[in-house]
Image (tube, helix red, strand yellow):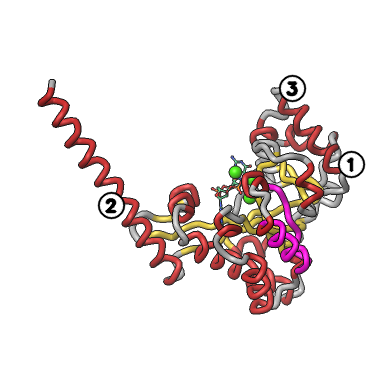
Amino acid sequence: AKHAGGNLMKFYAVEMNARALERLDLENGLRHAIEHDELVLHYQPQVSLSTGAIIGAEALVRWQHPQRGLLPPVDFIPIAEQSDLILALGEWVLRTACAQNRVWRESGLPPITVGVNLSARQFTSQDIAAMTGRVLRETGLPGDALELELTETILMADTEAFTRATEGLKALSISLSIDDFGTGFSSLAYLRRFSIDRLKIDQSFVRGLVEDASSAAIARAIISLSHSLSLSVIAEGVETREQLAFLYAYDCDEMQGYLFSRPIPAEAFEGLLREGREL
Ligand code: C2E
Ligand code: CA
Ligand code: CA
Ligand code: CA
């Protein structure tokens, strides 16, 4: 048994080494990717339920890996978040999305807001308002054409520095939204405290809209909460006509999901905007 235990330990050591190496490899690869333009943004349309028109785009990052093909964020964002790499990645995403929206606005297309996802570390390890202000100046995008998506986890870091950061962002006329709303543990008081503009109903509630009474009740409650606080509300992950019908009935403001479009490359998104595609 002792012998087998020893072998097992050796096996774990080898296994752990392989994992550590793979992580290091990914980390180095990602650093290279940020510097050599291997990252790309796809844009997913956000649509008004009252007009049917595209009113925004969420920027979602992908990694065009030289060997492994197009990687989804779940394959590399968690690794980036374990180090300051997420700061460089986050700034690249913000700059690229702002520059792109500036180009769209200058080319006479209907003006939209671009949404960018933020990680917790971007609030704790840098001056996010200063960085964002710089990016807006350098790209020429007005602050009111940018929305930053926070999670409830970020909100719970209710510190002096965080308060200052959100005030700095509001001073730039940027909109703030809460992503995956309803899945975290943030107190509703935070919605006022941090001048939140919009709630994004998590996909899990949208998925259950038709079959599951409690998902439907939660979605409905989030919509009425938003309206009583004068926030706007968008449903994410809308895949079917039936889900859309519920959202109409509940008076939801906006939707985003495969039913209208998957996240798509910038040129394809521009095509939808140009042809005036409606819901
Ligand atoms: P998220 O912010 O909640 O983004 C929505 C995710 O749902 C996206 O996955 C999107 O492609 C997917 N989605 C959209 N509509 C539908 C639908 O109708 N049905 C289904 N089943 N899925 C839908 P994606 O692009 O793989 O991104 C996953 C997560 O990675 C994002 O979740 C976000 O948390 C993170 N992420 C993406 N880009 C960035 C970034 O630039 N920075 C940071 N910090 N995180 C990012
Ligand atoms: Ca998001
Ligand atoms: Ca989300
Ligand atoms: Ca999510």
Q: In which image quadrant can residue 140 be found?
A: bottom right
Residue farthest left in this picture? 3
Q: Indicate whether 208 appears above or below 118.
A: above
Residue 240 percent location from the top left of the image: 69, 36
Count all numbered tags in the image, as a single digit.
Answer: 3
User: Counting residues from the N terminus, which is met first, the one under dot 1 or under dot 3?
Assistant: 3
Q: Amino acid at mark 1?
A: Ser
Question: In this figure, which residue is indicated by the disc labeled 1?
Answer: 228
Residue 121 against residue 49 in the figure, above or below: below
- In terms of image quadrants, where is residue 113? bottom right
Q: Secondary structure at mark 1?
A: helix
Horizontal and vertical percent position of residue 139: 65, 76
Task: Tell me if residue 94 can be seen.
Answer: yes
**Residue type (three-letter) at the residue carrying disc 3:** Ala
Horizontally, residue 191 falls left or right of residue 57, namely: right
Crowd around label 1: few <14 · some 14–19 · many ≥20 (10 Å) = few
Q: Which residues are magenta?
A: 162-178
Crowding at mark 3 (Cα within 10 Å: few <14, some 14-19, many 20+): few
> Image height check: is 153 above or below 108?
above
N-terminal-most mark, 1 or 2: 2
Label 1 and label 3: CA atoms lie apart by 22 Å
Disc number for residue 213 = 3
Q: Nearer the viewer, mark 2 or mark 3?
A: 2
**Crowding at mark 2 (Cα within 10 Å: few <14, some 14-19, many 20+):** few
Return the residue at label 2: 21
- Asked whether the residues under the numbered discs 1 and 2 touch, taking CB atoms below 8 Å apart as contact, a structural biologist would say no
Q: Secondary structure at mark 3?
A: helix
Residue 84 or 94: which is nearer the viewer? 84
